[in-house]
Image (spheres, rainbow, N blue to C red):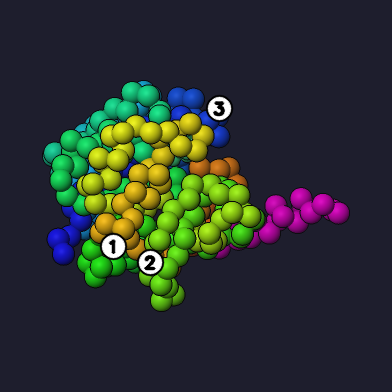
Amino acid sequence: MKPIRKAVFPVGGLGTRFLPATKALPKEMLPVVDKPLIEYAVEEARAAGIEEFVFVTSRGKTAIQNHFDSHLELEYALREKGRDSELSAITNAVGAPGQFAYVRQMEPLGLGHAVWTARNFIGNEPFAVLLADDLISGEPGALSEMSEVHNEYGGNVIALMEVAPAETARYGVVAPGTDDGRVVEVLDLVEKPDPAEAPSNLAIVGRYILQPEVLDFLALGETGAGGEIQLTDSMARLIGGAPFSGVRISGTRYDCGTKIGFLEANVAFALERDDLGGDIFARLEQVLESHRPDA
Ligand code: UTP
């Protein structure tokens, strides 16, 4: 099985749930502790062996391009001051010339439309899609776990996690076939089903390895849930062709598209850090104490 070389990062959405912060700042540039969400996703892709990166952007997203570009003046200033760790923090993100590409979605017609917009870059090979607002902690990264399954089974691979049955209407949900506890055969995909109609509580997380045939279905431009061109609907049409597997990811996923998930991620990532964890723990205890409902 050929390794996956290309990844698509759809960052064309409006980020309305984070207004006013996202009026002028791309949602994907919101930091978890001190690193933007999009950089975590790029690091995860790099660790999984991705060599070419395409960002599907829109108006107002140039901060993302600048973030992955050199900043010679800043690099010079940090070098002069001997600030080596800050210097490597900003140069680590920079790709090799030609490794990062940007296409404009022009209209936010949905995730499926964003992926289709990257079709000329994808060409005729399997590719990965990563949604930066699904932040996933843990080693190995989720895309690495999925790559391993792709090497074994081929076809299409999606990331899964179990959610409370009452929450299925917020996710794409899988109808499972054989299930060895880690890899699940995908028999069907349903976008945002009501709990009463959900085929399982296995929800799709924002990581995908897809065969290029999905682009033919996306090209039809059919709209689905919410009037958007949904990736899930076109993925569902791939079932029955090449193998279609789901992987229960071992890491923790934070929904950084919501305020609660984003705040939770900041706390959890800060607590993990050697330079912050102890302090944050003590401060959080104080904050919680002073905000107890009966205090
Ligand atoms: P979301 O559903 O979170 O939409 O998209 P959004 O517009 O970013 O945020 P809200 O709901 O208004 O707060 C999931 C991912 O798909 C991308 C988003 O940028 C995000 O990474 N996306 C969504 C696109 O690239 N284009 C679209 O048309 C829609």
Q: Residue 120 placed where, x, y %?
A: 18, 35
Residue at the far right in the pictured view: 294
Q: Which residue carries the number 2 mark?
A: 185
Tell which circle, 1 or 2, labels the residue nearer the N-terminal end: 2
- Judge left or right: residue 223 versus residue 241: right
Q: Which residue carries the number 1 mark?
A: 243
The answer to which quarter of the image holds residue 157 is bottom left
Q: Write the start and end of the magenta stretch as one range.
A: 275-295
Between 180 and 190, the one lying in front of the other is: 190
Judged from the image, the secondary structure of the residue bearing numbered disc 2 is strand
Q: Please state which amino acid type lies under the numbered disc 2.
A: Glu
Query: Which quadrant does ligand 1 occupy?
Result: top left
- Judge left or right: residue 46 versus residue 35: left
Between 16 and 286, the one lying in front of the other is: 16
Residue displayed at 42% across by 56% down: 188
Q: Please state which amino acid type lies under the numbered disc 3.
A: Pro
Residue displayed at 33% across by 55% down: 239
Mark 2 vs mark 3, CA separation in Å: 41 Å
Between 20 and 155, the one lying in front of the other is: 155
Residue 198 shows in this picture: yes
